[in-house]
Image (cartoon, grey):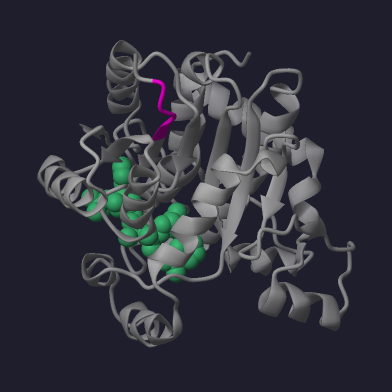
Amino acid sequence: MNTHKTVLITGANSGIGLAASVLFAHEGWNVIMACRNELKGMEARRAVVRAAKNERITMLQVDLSSFQSVRHFSRQVKGRFMKLDALINNAAYFAHGSPHRLSEDGIELTFAVNTVGPYLLTEELKELLLKAEDPRVLHASSNIIKHFFDPKKELRLNRVTGPWPVQDTFTVYDQYRDSKMALVMLMFKQASVYRGTPISFHALQINGAKMSKSTLEGIAYPWKAAARIQNLFFPPPDKMAEKYLQVCSYSQFGEISGKLINHRLQVMEPASKNPSFSMQTKQVLHADYYPFYADNEKVQNELWELCGELTNKQPL
Ligand SMILES: NC(=O)c1ccc[n+]([C@@H]2O[C@H](COP(=O)([O-])OP(=O)(O)OC[C@H]3O[C@@H](n4cnc5c(N)ncnc54)[C@H](OP(=O)(O)O)[C@@H]3O)[C@@H](O)[C@H]2O)c1
């Protein structure tokens, strides 16, 4: 019998997802690499097997922007695995400079991949998670949520579906910012909905990790130039992959749930409603605080209901 722990990592063919696949594999876990592009996924799987000398690596194709694909993928996972010890929602769409696009289910693409996809995947796989002894769900968030220190900023949930209003400028950057805040708020809500079950939900605030060539290619000018400069200063993806492993395996993170964790593995605290300049600086430089807005339970509930309605999936 295979007694190894099993982790599922989305967006496992590049960047932090690939580095994490190698690391978990090296630590002896079974790794399910969930990749959008089958060919890239197969190549990445071979690289992981080679690097970690672990053959228990499975690659399965999934497009997180498509409900049908997420459901088909989840059925495959449930057919092949008895339990899931960790689910890492790492994949993200951030093709800055791209125009407004709707997913095949009619959802703005950034929000579809970065928020609704992780919601549906978690719901579809919860029965496997519940079979593990100490299951963890980890979402990859970003320090881009710092924009919500602005008290005027709020999630535009009424823009998630349908055409973008002609009078408003659309940017993937703004949608990425909102989708990552929504992911943190979803995590808080999931932790409360699943309280009393063994599943721990957390989000990791990522400040930066060197982006792959193909990720940089997906970004349009002028964003590309800024991303290239930033990339010079970012640590390699392995550094964040280590945090993924630590959050998914250290016992301290199984004893708590519903936490936003920073790159030093510290639990972040909510900032006050009108954060001082020094508090905002601490957030940006040290990631000690997150915007007050994230704790807004009314918006958390609206988001939860919206995800449920969109995917037509009843919560627990
Ligand atoms: N790198 C940073 O500086 C940074 C900073 C803050 C937060 N983060 C977060 O950290 C995570 C990893 O970032 P990274 O830089 O390692 O990213 P990356 O190398 O660009 O990887 C993103 C992954 O997501 C996959 N993906 C995109 N759309 C998908 C879809 N519809 N269905 C399934 N998979 C899809 C990509 O697949 P393809 O290769 O096929 O496109 C790729 O495997 C992301 O959540 C990101 O938001 C990163």
Above or below: residue 22 compared with residue 118: below
Residue 4: say if magenta: yes
Q: Can the viewer see residue 74?
A: yes
Q: Is residue 79 left or right of residue 140?
A: left
Q: Is residue 13 magenta?
A: no
Residue at x 14% of width, y 46% of height? 46
Can you see residue 182?
A: no
Relative to the observer, which residue lies in front, 251 or 214? 251
| x and y percentages locating residue 207 in the rendered image | 55, 69
Looking at the image, which is closer to me, 99 or 192? Answer: 192
Count of picture labels:
0
Q: Nearer the viewer, residue 132 or 310?
A: 132
User: Picture coordinates of residue 12 (x, y %)?
Assistant: 31, 47
Residue that appears at 33% across and 61% down:
15
Measuring from the top left, give residue 310's x and y in whole percent: 49, 26
For the N terminus, which image quadrant?
Answer: top left
Residue 144 lies, in percent from the top left, at 58, 66
Main SS class of the magenta portion in the image: loop
Q: Quadrant of the C terminus?
A: top right
Residue 178, placed above or below residue 305: below
| Region of the chain picked out in magenta, as a range | 3-7
Q: Nearer the viewer, residue 222 or 214?
A: 214
Lateral position of residue 281 relative to residue 46, left or right = right
**Residue name at image x 59 percent, y 53 percent:** 204
The residue drawn where x is 57% and y is 27% is 135
Ligand 1 is found in the corner quadrant, namely bottom left
